[in-house]
Structures are given as C-alpha cells and as structure tokens.
Image (cartoon, grey):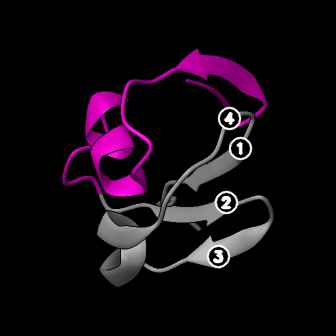
Amino acid sequence: MQIYVNDETRDITSDMLGVALDELGYGKTRIATAVDGTFVPASLRADHRLHEGARLEILAPMQGG
C-alpha cells in the first residue's frame, strides 16, 4: 500500500499504524503522529487503520533552546 509520510511517498505492507511505524524504522522512538491531519496518540496507534494514500505526519521532539 502506498501512503505519504511527511509528504514523501512510501510503500508499506501493513495497514495498521503501529506496525507501519515499525516498518518505517520508528519502532519505539518517541514521536507524535497525525493521520490525514488528525493527531493519533501513541496509545491508539496499534488499532488505527491506514488507507491507500493516507497522509501520515511524524514529528520527533527537538532539543535545544
């Protein structure tokens, strides 16, 4: 299935967000996610289903001041 991750096209095999994040290399990384503009908390990622062409935004925390 093809989705957009931070505006880049990516192919994934799973339609579940939690598995897709593992597949994309994020595993246990502390990140924030949004699908099609809606925030998806970490506690709901395992049950959140993706669709063809979904727009996934992944934000990593930044350090510094």
Task: Give the residue type at disc 2.
Answer: Val
Q: Which mark is residue 39?
A: 3
For residue 54, which numbered disc appears in the image? 1
Q: Give the range drawn in magenta.
A: 1-29
Spatial separation of the CA atoms under disc 4 and disc 2: 12 Å
Q: Which of 60 and 41 is in front in this view?
A: 41
Which is nearer the N-term, disc 1 or disc 2? Answer: 2
Q: Which of marks 1 and 3 is in front?
A: 1
Q: Which amino acid does label 4 sit on?
A: Glu
For label 1, the SS is loop
Outermost residue to the left: 28
**Do callouts 1 and 3 mark residues in contact (Cβ within 8 Å)?**
no
Label 1 amino acid? Ala
Tell me the element at label 3: strand
Task: Please state which of the two labelled residues, at mark 4 or mark 3, is closer to the viewer.
Answer: 4
Q: Residues within 10 Å of mark 4 (few under 14, many from 20)?
A: few
Helix, strand or loop for disc 2: strand
What is the CA distance from the residue labelled 1 to the residue labelled 2? Answer: 7 Å
Rendering quarter of residue 19: top left
Residue receiving disc 2: 35
Cβ atoms under marks 1 and 2 closer than 8 Å = yes
The N terminus - image quarter: top right
